[in-house]
Amino acid sequence: MPGPLSDKTFSDADQQRFAAASGDFNPMHVDAVAARRLLSGRQVVHGIHVLMHALERHRPDPGPGATEWVCNFANPVSVGDRVEFARSERDGRCVSTASVDGLVCAEIVCEPEVE
């Protein structure tokens, strides 16, 4: 079971800063009015923003010989959602998760070097 590390609620201001830094101004991420037409009905946080926050905040130790990070974005994170970040070990891999209300939205796995 993952151990909670921290939480973050992404705001519209976070979205605007990330869009400016990344150049991704897709309305689904930065326009609350346009986002109302989406299935979620709300602005969706950039997946890479969630990934970068998890990696920056928690600096998972890839261990010796780590060669690959794999991230699965299973469910969207919306602006205003409280995201809980956690980390665990699974089969010798470091696994970080970003969850909203217990639903895993992103899972980041460090794949060890294969000999």
Image (cartoon, helix red, strand yellow):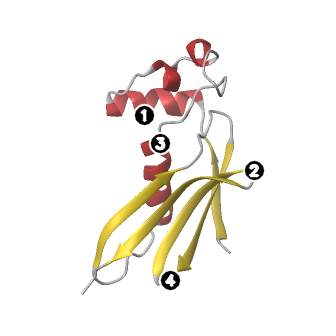
Give me the C-alpha separation between circle 2 and circle 4.
26 Å
Residue at numbered disc 2: 101
> Which is in the foreground here, disc 4 or disc 1?
4
Q: Earlier along the polypeptide chain: callout 1 or callout 3?
A: 1
CB within 8 Å, label 2 to label 4: no
Q: Position of residue 85 (x, y in %)?
A: 61, 59
Give me the C-alpha separation between circle 4 and circle 1.
34 Å
Q: Earlier along the polypeptide chain: callout 2 or callout 3?
A: 3
How packed is label 2: few (under 14 Cα within 10 Å), some, or many (20 or more)?
few
Q: Earlier along the polypeptide chain: callout 2 or callout 4?
A: 4
Q: Position of residue 105 (x, y in %)?
A: 60, 50
CB within 8 Å, label 4 to label 1: no
Is 100 left, or right, of 89 in this rendering? right
Give me the C-alpha separation between circle 2 and circle 3.
17 Å
Q: Is residue 74 above or below residue 64?
A: above
Disc 3, SS? helix
Tag 1: amino acid: Phe
Tag 4: amino acid: Asp
